Image (cartoon, rainbow, N blue to C red):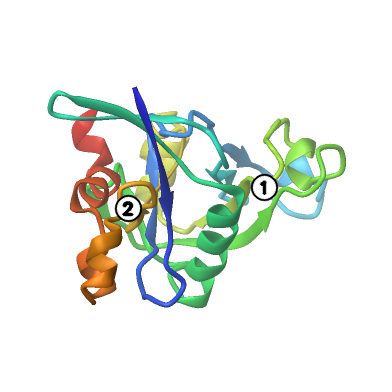
């Protein structure tokens, strides 16, 4: 079965468009719902309504299927880092969806970092064992319906990114020589798979 590396083009405006809260994250890592007592802030009552979890994990094969075509995709550490930076540089931190279908209001990425230490990283404190180079984020949920009906009930368990990527291995070299635009060089099949992940479950 073939394995396809997906990449970002720093010169284009393409990249991650939104963070989706989903029941079955493709990266197979659930988020942690953080409560105030987990930070031992006795003076704060109630829940902080923050979800923390992996957004992208480098070099993790993710199974995809498009019709009869089966393959794996993955992201390098370099691409994960670029994606995390471009997401914030392009002011996308308030873009969120539910199961890649419904746009949501009131969810914001309030913290974002790359795991650089397997012992002292903040994610370790919350029981996550993530590879070096993983992109981790904390999302503040100021949406009562999502928090009460989806997070607290366990209907959503993790994050799944949605956006636009190019296929590094199958990007046609001759097309570059012919002077086609970067948009023309995107592999539409891969874009559709990333954008419509929930339709393939």
The picture quadrant where one finds residue 184 is: bottom left
Q: Does residue 139 show up?
A: no
Q: Position of residue 147 (x, y in %)?
A: 44, 45
Residue 20 in the image, given as x and y percentages of width and height: 38, 48
Of 143 and 60, the residue lying toward us = 60
Who comes first in sequence, dot 2 or dot 1? Answer: 2
Count of marks, rendered view: 2
Residue 140 versus residue 30 in the image, above or below: below
Q: Residue at x 27, y 71 (%)?
A: 177
**Residue shown at 59%/55% (left/top)?**
78
What residue is at 48 percent from the left and 67 percent from the top?
Answer: 87
Q: Secondary structure at mark 1?
A: loop
The quarter of the picture where the C terminus appears is top left
Q: Residue at x 63, y 60 (%)?
A: 111
Instruction: Tell me where residue 17 appears, x and y as whole percent.
Output: 36, 62
Helix, strand or loop status at disc 2:
strand
Residue 165 shows in this picture? yes
Q: Gap between marks 2 and 1, in whole Å?
A: 25 Å
When asked about the image quadrant of residue 132, the answer is: top right
- Image vertical order of residue 159 relative to residue 104, above or below: above
Q: From what the image shows, is residue 67 above or below residue 92?
A: above
Q: Which residue is mark 1?
A: 133
Instruction: Give whichever of 41, 51 is nearer the camera.
Output: 51
Which residue is under mark 2? 97
């Amino acid at each position: 079965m073939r394995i396809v590396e997906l990449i970002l083009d720093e010169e284009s405006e393409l990249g991650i468009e939104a963070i989706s809260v989903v029941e079955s994250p493709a990266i197979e890592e659930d988020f942690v719902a953080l409560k105030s007592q987990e930070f031992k802030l006795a003076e704060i009552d109630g829940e902080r309504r923050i979800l923390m979890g992996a957004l992208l994990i480098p070099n993790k094969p993710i199974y995809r299927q498009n019709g009869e075509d089966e393959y794996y995709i993955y992201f390098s550490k370099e691409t994960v880092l670029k994606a995390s930076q471009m997401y914030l540089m392009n002011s996308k931190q308030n873009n969120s969806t539910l199961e890649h279908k419904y746009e949501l209001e009131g969810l914001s990425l309030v913290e974002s970092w790359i795991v650089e230490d397997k012992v002292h990283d903040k994610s370790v404190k919350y029981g996550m064992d993530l590879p070096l180079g993983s992109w981790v984020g904390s999302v503040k949920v100021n949406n009562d319906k999502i928090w009460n009906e989806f997070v607290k009930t366990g209907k959503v368990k993790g994050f799944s990114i949605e956006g636009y990527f190019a296929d590094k291995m199958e990007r046609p070299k001759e097309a570059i020589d012919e002077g086609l635009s970067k948009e023309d060089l995107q592999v539409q099949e891969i874009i559709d798979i990333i954008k419509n992940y929930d339709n393939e479950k």
